[in-house]
Image (cartoon, rainbow, N blue to C red):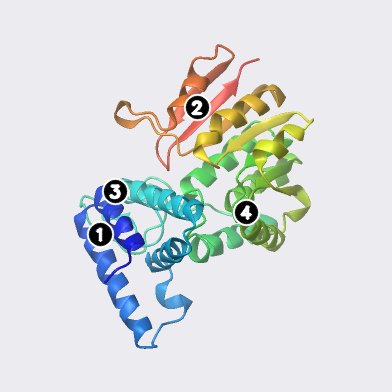
Amino acid sequence: MLSLAVMVLLAGLVHLIGQEQADAAAARQRRAMGSRNQGQQGGPGAMRGGIEPWLDELTKAYEKNDREKMGQLLEDMKQRGQRFQRGMGRPGEGMQPGQGRPMMGRRDTSSTENPPLSKSEAEKKTMSVLDDMDKNQRAGMMNVPITDGRLLRLLTETIGAKHVVEIGTSNGYSGNWLCLALRTTGGKLTTYEIDAHRASLARENFKRAGVDKLVTLIEGDAHKEAPKLKEPIDLLFIDADKEGYTDYLNKLLPLVRPGGLIVAHNISIRGGRAGIPEYVKAVTTNPDLETIFYEQGAGVSVTLKKR
């Protein structure tokens, strides 16, 4: 019998990606559990790119009564479900053109986009690490989709950002996208992560990508640590505890330079429903701000602090 945590997951899957995908996920989980019971568990490659590692993490979090971890994992699955619906996501989560069924091997990119290309050896090194992280570290990390990573890089480089502040480092995936731009602009990244394990992974990934000299990673609660900043901010990227978005905005907006940007992840206004309503209200009712909503990836708001 599946654990309660897995049953909760499957209920979410039915809602997010449809009964057919949920049934397939359940079948894979039962097979995986059966293999473990027989002492025949496969190596990491056997599950790579699938949902089983995520299921295992959720089950472990449930058994430890780790509510914060369960919430993070369920938010990650919500993002996966959104990418299923859009025909994007990790390999195996794309949609066959003209059909409603998943197609194996499709990356997180729309049908009109090509994969990102490297201009230099340094960029190639970072892109290689990003690709490895996408394939092997995404489960449980709540990383941005590739589409949103590309958007972050584009915005950062377009405004010539010298100082980017990121709330929610995770394992450094979005930070590496930001650093692709910062290497060109001569800028730096200040990023905050409350989880020690993720912070450790991020440090390693920044070093592997050759951008660690551009990064200051502050481990701790960003609600307490970020207000200690004194330097101007060119771009603020918020991707952490959703209930804390408005607090981050209020505390750091004074440091965002006129003409600077505030980018918030997991913001969606589809069907008239606003993700994180309090934050959406804050960035759409302040006359000093101008906000648009980018819906292609996991839902992003881009806010300009007017000059």
Residues packed near mark 3 inside 10 Å, few (<14), some (14 to 19) or many (20 plus): many
The amino acid pointed to by label 4 is Asp
Q: Nearer the viewer, mark 1 or mark 4?
A: 4
The amino acid pointed to by label 2 is Tyr
x, y percent for residue 101: 22, 56
The amino acid pointed to by label 1 is Ala
Separation of disc 4 and disc 2 at Cα?
24 Å
Residue under label 4? 195
Of residues 114 and 39, the one nearer the viewer is: 39
- CB within 8 Å, label 1 to label 2: no
Separation of disc 1 and disc 2 at Cα?
32 Å
Residues packed near mark 4 inside 10 Å, few (<14), some (14 to 19) or many (20 plus): some
Residue under label 3? 16
Residue under label 1? 22
- CB within 8 Å, label 4 to label 2: no
x, y percent for residue 105: 36, 63
The amino acid pointed to by label 3 is Leu
Of residues 45 and 123, the one nearer the viewer is: 45
Q: Is residue 59 above or below residue 35?
A: above
